[in-house]
Structures are given as C-alpha cells and as structure tokens.
Image (cartoon, rainbow, N blue to C red):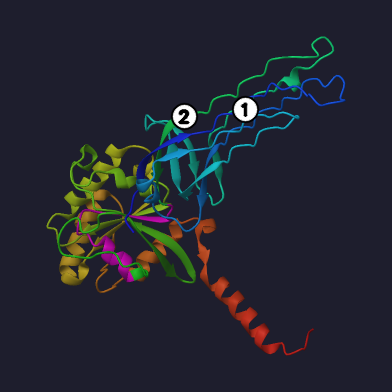
Amino acid sequence: MKFLDLTKVYIRSGGGGGGCVSFRREKFIEYGGPDGGDGGNGGSVWAEAVEGLNTLIDFRYQQHFFAKSGQAGMGSGRTGARGDDIVLRVPVGTEIMDEDQETVLDDLTEVGQRVLLAKGGNGGWGNLHFKSSTNQAPRRANPGQPGIERTIWLRLKLIADVGLLGLPNAGKSTFLAATSNARPKIADYPFTTLYPNLGVVGVDGVEFVVADIPGLIEGASEGRGLGDLFLGHVERCAVLLHLVDGTSGDPAKDYETIIGELEAYGGVLAEKPRITVLNKIDTMDEEERAFLKEELETAIGGPVMLMSGASQENVTDVLRALRSQIDDNRLRMKQAEEEVTSNSTNEDEGDTTWQP
C-alpha cells in the first residue's frame, strides 16, 4: 500500500426537499383543508478519525463526496425522507484545511473524533405548516435549502513519540529496523526512504512509537531533494532524535545543516527537546570516537551520545535517554499488559469449578 499524506477532496452536502402544496379531498369528508407535508433534510458530510489507517491513499481513487438530498414532502401530511449522511474515514492525526491550505478547520487527533464539514440543507415547509385561523387554505410552500459545496485539503501528520532527523544515509532506517519490528528499505545510496515509517520500540518494560522520515538536505525548505513537507510528521513528537553520520567527514556541518532546515521550517519544531547522537561508531577506533564527540559537542554546546545502529552498540542507552524525555502518559506499559494477560490465563487454567 502506497503512502499518501496530502490530498484534495471535493464535498457537497445534500439539499433539503421542497414542501408540498396539497389539500385533502375525500368523499364525505367536509372541510378537508391543507395536508401538504414538509420536505426532508439533506444529508451532511462528516469526517471521522478511525483506527487501522495510516495513509490517505483511499482518497486518491475517490475525491468527490456528495451527500443525498432530502425528498420532497407529500400529501396526507407526509414528510419527505431525509438524505443519508456521508462520513469520510481518515487516519488519526489528520488535519482538515480550507481550500487555501492555510486555514485549519479541525485537527483529528483521537479515535472516534468527528467534525461536521458541510451541513445538509433544511427541508421546506408544506402548506399544512402555514395553516392558521385567518388563512385556512394556504397555497404556498417553501423550497428546501440548497446544500453546501466546498473544497478541502486533508493532510496527515503521523502521531509518534519520537521523530528521527538526519541527512540521507545517516542511519535512521537502520536504527528503526534494529530497535523495532519495522522493516524500512535500507541501502547505501541517498534517499532510500521515500515516505515515513513507524515502528514500536520497547525498553525497560515500556513501549513508544518512533517515526522515520526521509532525509533532509541543505535547501530542503526551498524544495531541494524531497523538500521539508515530511517534517509535519514529527511536529507531534515529544522528542527528536538527531542522528549525525560519524563517517561523513564533517559531522558539525551536517548538524548545522539540519538545524538550519528546522528553523527555516518554522513553528515549534526547532524548540522541541532534541537528543543528538553520533552514529556509525563501529567504523571508528576509540581515539577517533573521542575526537569527533568533543568536536561535535563544542559545535552544538551540549552533550552528544555515541551509537552504532548496525552493531547495536549503545542503542539501549539511547532508547533510555529518549524514554526520559517522553511524558509518562504517552508511554505504553508493556510489562503491565503482559502480567494482566498471564494472570487471566493462569486463572482460566486453574479454575476447574463446574459452572452451568
């Protein structure tokens, strides 16, 4: 399944049915009077965040969503049927924007969250609605209100706890593959990762979600390479893991390139908690490791961790450092769930009491 995180959608709610002008005419019924019913309301268009989706690929094959209109009213005081609603099922973390791609209409960040995008038109009143003591035979009815037609944009921002940053071939996908069950594409050429990947990482009995995005290069904010559109997928992260390639020749310059792109992107992304890691230390001796670490710490004015995703050296220490930066309410308690499962299994096996 391909990954799609931005799509344009055309929606239209249903129009209301018109009211009916009708009079009761039956044999032996005196003073029948008006009996025209009201029109039915038109269907509305909703958006709902659901589980099991992590891409907007479904909207590539269908971009138009038109709700049904309400039926017109009928004689004998019968109201027209209401038009059916349409629900756009989107992944959790979807932003709904207006046609200008700047005005955010809503942000669906929880499962089951719904938002009304276009309300259906109200049905018109029939002539029965206008009957009064001074107008006992009204011959008018209201037409139904028209539906609302609009164009919206859906933009998906993955919800993860940790976001991976770095230049192409910095080792982001290798780190994700070494710490989770995710299997991103890994190769020895730039831009191997073309779309974001998610992986669930566990350490010390807790789990959290890590997002790997395509690598940034200098000028990404101006559209070079794959651009910086994928940075939206790490906006919701609690902490950023910045991987610097220790074999690049100038790690300090690589670090400054990524930080420059974060600042050019704007928002709060450059202010998020960040852990800097010098990667691929398995190719260095102790003297080279110490030299590059000191050089990088001097350039950034903060601590730098050493790690090798390929040999998994110091990977656990990095995961623990990430865990310390994540809020407790975002962590998933792995041990507690396993204990509950094992206890329930043991109780089922040990309980031999017969029950009807």
- Segment colored magenta: 159-178
**Residue placed furthest toward the top:** 134
Q: Residue tagged by mark 2?
A: 149
Judged left or right of residue 15, residue 174 is: left
x 75%, y 17%: residue: 130
Residue labelled with disc 1: 122
Q: Mark 1 falls on what kind of element?
A: loop
Q: Amino acid at mark 2?
A: Glu
Question: Between residues 258 and 286, which one lies in front from this camera angle?
Answer: 258
Disc 2 crowd, CA 10 A, few/some/many (<14, 14-19, 20+): some
Q: Is residue 147 left or right of residue 211?
A: right
Residue 175 drawn in magenta: yes
Of the two numbered discs 1 and 2 on the same chain, state the one appearing first in sequence. Answer: 1
Instruction: Work out whether residue 306 can be spotted.
Output: no
The image quarter containing residue 307 is: bottom left
- Amino acid type, mark 1: Asn
Considering the image in quadrants, where does the C terminus appear? bottom right
Q: Is residue 353 magenta?
A: no
Q: Is residue 27 above or below residue 332?
A: above
Residue 96's spot in the image, x, y percent? 45, 38
